[in-house]
Image: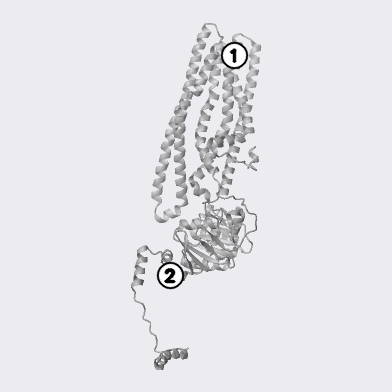
């Protein structure tokens, strides 16, 4: 796989049972790139480690005054230099390719999982953790995948050097063969502590990222309630904790790096002392001493990859665990569906609450608990993220339909809809019936001021439909974003439209006009509005009141206001004390006098009719 071939047509099915299994799966899928990096790495490291032998041969040829051997040694050094350059170039190319392709594979898998889970993702995994996995963690996993091939090439090169020194000069080769493994594995006892500190740092960094993302998402609300300083202090404390954890982790890694400098230096001193002693005894030549000395110096280069692979694994292991946790999430229902049928129609029924929505009508649902309303909206859309009985549309369980069919039949707009960046025309480019024009939807949602604001913000857009929307519509107010999302839902024109608090961020005058436009544009379609707004409730054909998750009362708005105290408390925002006082006053008030006319005498009756005659004459 090359970088220019990205993205993958099929990134595969990951082994998300654990972090190490995910790492193994990524490495196995990069097998071709790993082999190429290994071969180029072997060429590069072997050529680097062959230079000391060339230097030793050149020194010995100079001592022996052999011009022929000196020239031959020069040719060998030229070949080694060329091999070093070529190997390093293609090793770097193969390593970077492995890094980018592994990270891209993981990003595709995470993107597909996010699209597969939908809104259920952030309910089961914190938003900050999702951001951490999709940005920093994929880079660390790609780093480990590409570092494996370089480490393998370095380890094989060290083994080859030890064997070559044993053959070339056994007296000093034994010292090097014993010393190099000690140098390579002396830091292993420190790795668990370094890894644990790195884990603590990554955990604290994830918490800080989650806090930052939540703060940014609710910044407008925080400014409204004056909570910016509070959350700023929280993030400041979290960032300081991350800094302290990073310093503690860096201290341990600095100790490991220092040992990687100290121990090879001690080995080099031992080799020199032993080599000088052997040279004085005449057991080795000067060229052999220079060769062994140079080999020990040069072999420090591949030894550094032992520390790098340890660091890469320690940083990628918690990242792999987080990525595996996200990739292992599954939906409660099968998105492919178990029933092949045409789109159903008819009444919408929720067995969990007993709610029944009549077809082709405007039904308003009042819930005292906003969270309960959100869960109800999820159930009404089918394939809910929480376990429970399936909602029926025309007697057909929505969970037995494919996810695409369920979303076509029932469209749910939650209370915090998302606007993607792009033009207004692109925003309305959604699967739709084609019967509702964008202009009509915008007019029904009262978006005239929104269009004006978008045109003013896009200097090069003469047509409002070409005006650009910033990321998540942050340049617009909450009410403007809410009305644009409502217009988008109206353009889709589904058979059943479920709206969760569609006018909670607009003023009462605009809300009244939206209610009229919504009722007019959705005539003949099934519309469910989860709201407690009297303006919307008054225009609904049918109002259903849910108490503690169950249907408690049904009727028209003006009927429920007078007959259901719990409904009145939710709609009018009455407190329990105010509600009890009102009930007490109604109970204590005397009944109004009811006088019946005396029908036995005609005069009083005629007297009662005289005012009516006067009114008729004046009219």
| Secondary structure of residue under mark 2 | helix
Q: In the rendered view, tell whether residue 113 sits above or below residue 165.
A: below
* Front residue of this view, candidates 431 and 216: 431
Q: Is 35 on the left or on the right of 564, as rendered?
A: right
- The numbered mark, 2 or 1, whose residue comes first in the sequence reads 1
Quadrant hosting residue 68: top right
Are the two marked residues, 2 and 1, in contact with CB atoms closer than 8 angstroms? Answer: no
Note whether 601 is above or below 386 in the view shown. below
Which quadrant of the rendered structure holds the N terminus? top right
Q: Position of residue 362 (x, y in %)?
A: 54, 66
Which residue position holds label 2?
Answer: 563
Query: Is residue 288 found left or right of 508 in the rendered image?
Result: right
Q: Which mark is residue 125?
A: none
Judge the density around disc 1: few (<14), some (14-19), many (≥20) Cα neighbours within 10 Å.
few
- Kindly give the residue lying farthest to the top in the view shown: 281
Dot 1: element: helix
Where residue 285 sits: x, y (%)?
Answer: 56, 9
Whole-percent x, y for residue 560 in the image = 45, 69
């Amino acid at each position: 796989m090359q970088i220019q071939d990205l993205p993958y047509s099929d990134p595969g099915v990951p082994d998300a049972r654990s972090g190490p299994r995910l790492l193994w799966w990524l490495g196995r899928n990069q097998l071709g790139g790993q082999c190429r990096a290994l071969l180029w790495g072997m060429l590069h490291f072997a050529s680097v480690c062959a230079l000391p032998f060339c230097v030793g041969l050149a020194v010995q040829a100079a001592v022996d005054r052999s011009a022929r051997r000196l020239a031959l040694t020069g040719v060998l050094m030229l070949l080694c230099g060329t091999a070093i350059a070529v190997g390093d170039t293609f090793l770097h190319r193969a390593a970077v390719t492995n890094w980018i392709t592994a990270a891209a594979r993981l990003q595709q898998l995470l993107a597909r999982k996010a699209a597969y889970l939908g809104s259920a993702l952030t309910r089961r995994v914190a938003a900050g953790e999702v951001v951490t996995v999709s940005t920093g963690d994929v880079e660390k996993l790609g780093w480990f995948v590409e570092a494996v091939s370089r480490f393998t090439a370095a380890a094989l090169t060290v083994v080859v050097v030890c064997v070559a020194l044993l053959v070339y000069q056994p007296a000093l080769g034994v010292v090097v063969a014993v010393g190099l493994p000690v140098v390579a594995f002396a830091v292993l006892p420190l790795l668990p502590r370094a890894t644990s500190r790195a884990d603590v740092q990554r955990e604290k960094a994830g918490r800080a990222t989650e806090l930052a993302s939540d703060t940014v998402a609710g910044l407008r609300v925080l400014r409204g309630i004056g909570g910016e300083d509070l959350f700023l202090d929280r993030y400041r404390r979290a960032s300081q904790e991350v800094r302290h954890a990073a310093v503690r982790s860096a201290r341990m890694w600095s100790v490991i790096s220092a040992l990687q400098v100290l121990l090879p230096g001690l080995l080099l001193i031992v080799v020199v002392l032993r080599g000088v002693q052997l040279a004085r005894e005449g057991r080795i030549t000067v060229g052999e001493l220079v060769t062994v000395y140079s080999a020990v110096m040069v072999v420090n280069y591949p030894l550094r990859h032992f520390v790098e692979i340890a660091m890469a694994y320690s940083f990628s292991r918690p990242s792999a665990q987080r990525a595996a946790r996200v990739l292992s999430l599954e939906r409660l229902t099968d998105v492919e569906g178990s029933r092949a049928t045409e789109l159903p129609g008819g009444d919408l029924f929720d067995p969990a609450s007993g709610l029944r929505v009549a077809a082709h009508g405007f039904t308003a649902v009042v819930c005292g608990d906003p969270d309960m309303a959100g869960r109800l909206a999820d159930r009404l859309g089918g394939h809910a993220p929480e376990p429970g009985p399936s909602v029926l549309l025309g007697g057909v369980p929505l969970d037995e339909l494919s996810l695409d069919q369920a979303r076509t039949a029932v469209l749910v707009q939650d209370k915090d809809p998302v606007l993607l960046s792009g033009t207004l025309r692109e925003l309305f480019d959604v699967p739709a019936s084609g019967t509702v024009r964008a202009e009509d939807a915008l007019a029904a949602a009262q978006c005239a001021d929104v269009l004006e604001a978008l045109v003013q913000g896009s200097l090069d857009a003469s047509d409002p439909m070409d005006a650009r929307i910033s990321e998540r519509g942050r340049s617009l107010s909450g009410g403007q974003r809410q009305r644009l999302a409502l217009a988008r839902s109206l353009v889709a024109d589904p058979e059943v439209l479920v709206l969760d608090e569609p006018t909670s961020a607009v003023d009462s005058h605009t809300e009244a006009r939206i209610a009229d436009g919504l009722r007019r544009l959705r005539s003949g379609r099934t519309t469910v509005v989860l709201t407690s707004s009297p303006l919307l409730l008054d225009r609904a054909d049918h109002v259903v009141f849910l108490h503690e998750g169950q249907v408690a009362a049904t009727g028209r708005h003006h009927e429920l206001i007078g007959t259901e105290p719990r409904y009145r408390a939710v709609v009018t925002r009455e407190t329990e004390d105010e509600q009890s006082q009102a009930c007490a006053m109604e109970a204590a008030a005397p009944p109004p006098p009811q006088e019946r006319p005396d029908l036995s005498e005609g005069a009083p009756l005629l007297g009662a009719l005289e005012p009516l005659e006067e009114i008729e004459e004046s009219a």
